[in-house]
Image (tube, grey):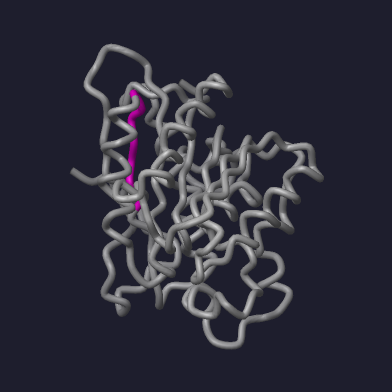
């Protein structure tokens, strides 16, 4: 089953791109409770959705007592703002249908990996509290209640992230837009609490990204928790084969408990 985010026309849709319209894949707990939920933004450099950052993450969230969705957001040749629009709408969609999904509308979290982490960092800097110029779902807040950034691309202007930047913005993007979409530059006063983790030896998305984001959060007095593991390559996902790094997931659950999310 998949839930289509828009029923009456997807913004920025281009049939020539031969991509499906954005959807949410549900992994809902089958119980009588009103559950917390986490929406998963997989990585893949804005050119693909990395599979081990999709269903395996959602199922592990289920095991921890959380409902989940995986967002199939648009990829290149789509550019900003289409992709951010998908992410914001996903939060609105889940919140609007909270009763149907047995979800607490004030306990909607997001988790992003690599480029999906960049998308999540953009969401917490640019969400809105509802608009009057769309459908009923657009009138709902797109502010998440918690955010986890996993080896996330934050410093979009860093020359080491040319692939993600070009896929998101096209060739030779405007420098002001690159700066605007660099997560550390857009921390809001009402930003939700943030959990971050990275490995120090990540050679694809350097740990500087999480360190700079943490400093930006500190400056705005936003609660955050940061874990940097000394060893491990980029894109580990659940990291089941790395006894040390795989601690990130129980640490995340402890953090959610600390923030009264579970």
Q: Main secondary structure of the magenta part?
A: strand
Q: What's the magenta region?
A: 65-71
From the top left corner, tell me how far across and down residue 94 is, in percent: 40, 35
**Quadrant position of residue 153:** bottom right
Q: Is residue 68 magenta?
A: yes
Count how many numbered circles sit on residues in the image: 0
Locate residue 215 relative to residue 19 in the image: left or right: right
From the top left corner, tell me how far across and down residue 237 is, in percent: 36, 52
Locate residue 178 relative to residue 54 in the image: left or right: right
Q: Residue at x 47, y 25 (%)?
A: 105
From the top left corner, tell me how far across and down residue 137 is, in percent: 46, 39
**Quarter containing the N terminus:** top left
Q: Residue furthest left?
A: 1
**Quadrant position of residue 200:** bottom right
Q: Is residue 42 above or below residue 147?
A: below
Locate residue 173 relative to residue 74 in the image: left or right: right
From the top left corner, tell me how far across and down residue 37 is, in percent: 40, 31
Locate residue 51 relative to residue 130 in the image: left or right: left
Relative to the observer, which residue lies in front, 138 or 128? 128
Q: Residue at x 51, y 70 (%)?
A: 203
Q: Is residue 198 magenta?
A: no
Q: Residue furthest bottom?
A: 172
Q: Residue furthest top?
A: 32
**Quadrant position of residue 144:** top right
């Amino acid at each position: 089953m998949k839930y289509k985010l828009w029923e009456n026309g997807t913004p920025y849709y281009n049939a020539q791109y031969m991509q499906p319209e954005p959807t949410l894949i549900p992994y809902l707990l089958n119980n009588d409770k009103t559950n917390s939920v986490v929406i998963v933004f997989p990585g893949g450099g804005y050119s693909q959705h990395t599979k081990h950052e999709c269903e395996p993450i959602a199922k592990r969230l289920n095991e921890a007592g959380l409902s989940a969705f995986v967002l199939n957001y648009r990829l290149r040749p789509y550019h900003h703002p289409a992709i951010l629009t998908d992410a914001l709408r996903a939060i609105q969609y889940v919140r609007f249908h909270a009763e149907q999904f047995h979800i607490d509308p004030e306990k909607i979290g997001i988790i992003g990996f690599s480029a999906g982490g960049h998308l999540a960092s953009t969401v917490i800097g640019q969400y809105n509290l509802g608009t009057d110029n769309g459908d009923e779902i657009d009138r709902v807040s797109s502010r998440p209640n918690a955010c986890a950034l996993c080896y996330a691309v934050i410093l979009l202007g860093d020359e080491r992230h040319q692939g993600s930047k070009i896929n998101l913005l096209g060739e030779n993007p405007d420098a002001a837009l690159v700066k605007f979409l660099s997560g550390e530059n857009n921390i809001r006063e009402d930003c939700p609490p943030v959990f971050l983790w990275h490995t120090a030896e990540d050679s694809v998305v350097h740990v500087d990204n999480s360190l700079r984001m943490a400093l930006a959060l500190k400056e705005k007095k936003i609660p955050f928790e940061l874990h940097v593991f000394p060893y491990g390559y980029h894109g580990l996902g659940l990291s089941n084969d790395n006894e040390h790094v795989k601690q990130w997931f129980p640490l995340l659950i402890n953090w959610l408990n600390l923030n009264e999310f579970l």
